[in-house]
Image (cartoon, rainbow, N blue to C red):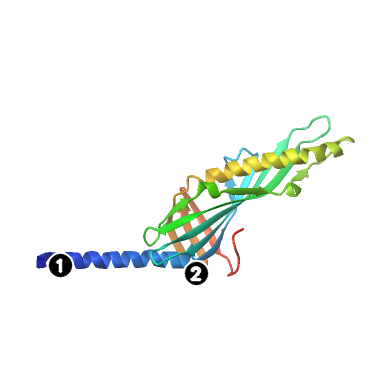
């Protein structure tokens, strides 16, 4: 072997080792559960929608890779115009949870690739958690409101599912990851986000 290429090979091996170490360090630093801050959603179909994200990372090896669970707690609000039964507009709000799982692979010391399994997406909305807010009702409105609850829950489920698909299905990377103690800042789908590490034992549901 030509002696002149030995330094090149050695430098290449050192670079690969350092690169692998930086990817693994990022993976180790991310272990556990992280909770985000409220975000406004503009593409849910609802009059108003907010979301709080949670992320859980679980390492599966020494190459900066592992399993990831992403959860979105989404609340939607819809407004029903006044009619013969409702003197003033009725606000209908509901909350749901959307969860998706997949794999992550640290790309370098501050970027991560995601491979989310679209078939794992689950959306849950509690019909009992649907809230109907109003100011003035007519005498016949009580039973009318009760009849609205199932339809409102179905609409909320559709809107939360739509919002979750928009959030998760185009997500392939987490960029510019910066961790300072229990705070994490990063970029996801061109949005700057902040997360806080949750105490040990907290799991993403």
At 44% from the left and 49% from the top, the residue drawn is: 172
At 63% from the left and 41% from the top, the residue drawn is: 159
Q: From this viewpoint, which residue is outermost toward the top? A: 84
Give the CA distance from mark 1 to mark 2.
41 Å
With respect to residue 116, does 8 lie above or below? Answer: below
| Helix, strand or loop status at disc 2 | loop
| Helix, strand or loop status at disc 1 | helix
- To which residue does mark 2 refer? 181
Quarter of the picture containing the N terminus is bottom left
At 73% from the left and 38% from the top, the residue drawn is: 151
Quarter of the picture containing the C terminus is bottom right
Q: Residues within 10 Å of mark 2 (few under 14, many from 20)?
A: few
Quarter location, residue 70: bottom right
Give the image location of residue 107, x and y in percent. Answer: 37, 58
Q: Residue 6: which numbered mark, if any?
A: 1
Could you tell which of marks 1 and 2 lies nearer the N-terminus? Answer: 1
Quarter location, residue 174: bottom left
Q: Is residue 100 left or right of residue 107?
A: right
Comparing labels 1 and 2, the label whose residue is closer to the camera = 1
Give the image location of residue 50, x and y in percent. Answer: 62, 48
Give the image location of residue 195, x and y in percent. Answer: 53, 60
């Amino acid at each position: 072997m030509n002696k002149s290429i030995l330094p090149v090979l050695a430098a290449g091996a050192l670079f690969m080792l350092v690169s692998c170490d930086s990817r693994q360090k990022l993976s180790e630093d991310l272990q556990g559960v992280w909770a985000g801050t409220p975000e406004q959603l503009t593409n849910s179909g609802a009059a108003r929608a907010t979301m709080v994200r949670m992320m859980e990372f679980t390492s599966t090896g020494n190459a900066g890779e592992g399993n990831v669970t992403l959860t979105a707690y989404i609340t939607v609000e819809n407004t029903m115009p006044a009619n013969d039964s409702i003197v003033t507009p009725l606000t209908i709000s509901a909350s749901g949870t959307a969860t998706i799982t997949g794999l992550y692979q640290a790309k370098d010391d501050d970027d991560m690739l995601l491979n989310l399994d679209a078939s794992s997406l689950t959306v849950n909305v509690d019909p009992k958690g649907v809230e109907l807010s109003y100011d003035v009702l007519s005498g016949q409105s009580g039973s009318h409101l009760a009849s609205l609850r199932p339809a409102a829950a179905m609409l909320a489920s559709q809107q939360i599912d739509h919002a979750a698909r928009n959030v998760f299905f185009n997500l392939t990377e987490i960029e510019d990851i910066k961790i300072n103690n229990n705070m994490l800042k990063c970029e996801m789908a061109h949005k700057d986000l902040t997360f806080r590490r949750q105490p040990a034992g907290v799991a993403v549901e």
